[in-house]
Amino acid sequence: MTLAKDPTATSSARLKQISIVGAGAIGQLIYHQLSSAVNASSVSLNIISRAQHSKQQKLTFTDLNNVESTYIAELVGQDDYGQQLPKTDLLIVCVKAYQVVAALKILIPMLSSHCHILLLHNGMGPHLDVANMLKGQSLTLGTTSQGALKQSAWHTKQTGKGITQLGTFNTESIFNSQSTVNTKNAFHPQKAFSQQRASKQRVLPESLKNILLSAIPHSQWCVDILTMLWQKLAINVAINPLTAIHHCHNGQLADEQYRDIITAVVIELVNVAKAEHISLALPAILDKVYQVIALTAANYSSMHQDVQHQRTTEIDAINGFVVQMAKRHGIATPHNQQLVDHIKHLELQYQR
Ligand code: KPL
């Protein structure tokens, strides 16, 4: 699949290559958006597959107006990682939060140091590990509220509009908050800082930024992406586990019976964010949570779907991340811990 001309490309420059890892609903949605937004010819697009052999795959996409499009996508199999990954300019990682580190352990060593990596998953946490794994690549973080559902392995339907926020992971900004902490995924700021100094390639270039922003509807570039990620996390810590535990649509959480627990988990998150130098105003954040509950009232959250389909959930990167960060700062988060424990208990019922 080839996409629009890069305005910064010189005549001798080769095609820009964008690769997507993770062909779940969001990965396929982003593939569709990149393919349909730009259709001239100086970007190539492929999907990094876990299969051994590369192949072409027909993808079907149904949009919000029920219009179907089909694409022939290049799936890059492991046989061709060594040939294709060094050519990738932007790797968009759309796997689940708990799969990010394992996937990038394999892929980063094969990427060029000029490649840019974009993490687009629910929850937070993997970015801290990934920052320590980089071999010169830049790291962009993103969050999307677009809704998509797989109809079958290679047929995805968009189920909701939503904003997508992207921004550079500024490694310097967390220098003070994490430099003295020694945990499994403690970030090593000195290393990243020197990498950042050593290479001018450590931020996404305008050409790639423009491709993303023009392809993804309602997308925006955020200077303070971490604050945006914490805001989205506040929505997820409230909605995701409660809908999974109570087996309900998002909209049901507007009931009075859930008000106390929603308020409690969000207060805990706001306290932990503050310790991380992220300032969130509680009333505004709670309003946002209830807005999303109303806007997505008929939807089942991703965690509800994971539990219903007996899949591993993203609880570690959602309420688990709040608990983990709270421990670093000696902050109590009993309500988030209680939801983590409950979801882990549900997972155990089907993962035994
Ligand atoms: O992000 C979501 C999710 O389900 O993971 C929300 C916003 C809660 C929508 O369902």
Image (cartoon, rainbow, N blue to C red):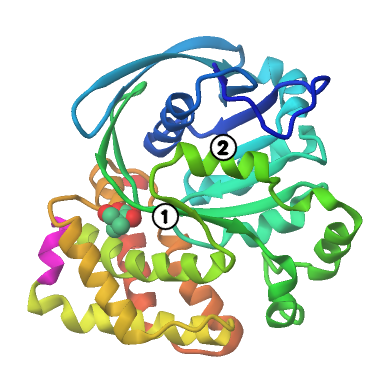
Q: Disc 2 vs disc 1: which is toward the camera?
A: 2
Task: Using residue 158 as the reference point, say whether residue 333 is left or right of it.
Answer: right
Is 247 a magenta residue? yes
**Mark 1 lies within 8 Å of ligand 1 (Cβ measured):** yes
Location of mark 2 (residue): 211
> How far is the residue under mark 2 from the one under mark 1?
29 Å
* Amino acid residing under circle 1: Glu
Across and down, in percent, residue 286 comes to 28, 79
At mark 2, the secondary structure is helix
Is 336 a magenta residue? no
Task: Using residue 247 as the reference point, say whether residue 330 is left or right of it.
Answer: right
The mark that comes first in sequence, 2 or 1, is: 2
Task: Using residue 160 as the reference point, say whether residue 184 is left or right of it.
Answer: right
- Residue at 39%, 43% (x, y): give it: 217
Residue stretch rendered in magenta on the structure: 246-254
At mark 1, the secondary structure is loop
Q: What label does residue 314 carry, if any? A: 1
Residue 225's place in the image compared with 20, above or below, is: below
Across and down, in percent, residue 249 comes to 14, 55
* Amino acid residing under circle 2: Ile
Ligand 1 appears in which quadrant? bottom left
Q: Is residue 181 visible?
A: yes
